[in-house]
Image: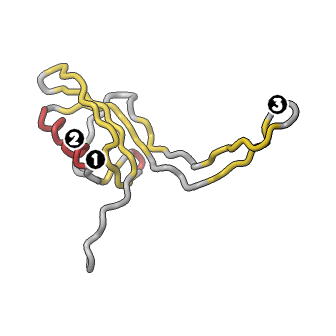
Amino acid sequence: MLKWGDTEINLIQDTYDLPGADAGMTEIELLPNPDGSYATVIQQGPRSRRRVSWRGWVASQAEIEAFQGDYYAGQVREFTGYDNVSFHALIFSFSPGNRYFQHYIEYSIVLIEATPPEEPEGE
């Protein structure tokens, strides 16, 4: 079951993209060879932040506004995906979609990995 904080996610079938990150490798061209090809080196840095996206639906405008509020505020929450994948994330992009029925409003969302919120001292 997918969750954003305590909110259970209603997915639209086949729209969930598994969390993934870039390995942080870049190939840099150095000097050209006489044949026109280039000698290269690979520079490796830390991996990028994980991202996860999906299209989902909610049953009310209040739920859309809750996602928008988190998006505008940069709210960090725990994302829980399939197979117990879990990390702190914030909403990188959010697009409310169409209302097809009274209690069916679609949206699309992209979460990006965030650093965990600071724990208060002494806890």
As measured in the structure, the alpha-carbon distance from the residue carrying label 1 to the one carrying label 3 is 51 Å
Q: CA distance from mark 3 to mark 2?
A: 52 Å
Q: Which residue is mark 1?
A: 4
- For badge 1, the amino acid type reads Trp
Q: Quadrant of the C terminus?
A: bottom left
Residue ID at (17%, 42%): 66
> Mark 2 = which residue?
67
Q: Give me the C-alpha separation between circle 2 and circle 1.
A: 9 Å
Q: Which residue is mark 3?
A: 36
Closer to the camera, 37 or 7? 37
Q: CB under 8 Å between callouts 2 and 1?
A: yes
Q: Quadrant of residue 121?
A: bottom left
Q: How far from the left and from the top, in percent, is residue 60?
A: 13, 32
Foreground mark, 1 or 3? 3
Helix, strand or loop for disc 2? helix
Which of the two discs, 2 and 1, sits closer to the camera?
2
Of callouts 1 and 3, the N-terminal one: 1
Residue type for callout 2: Phe
Q: Amino acid at mark 3?
A: Gly
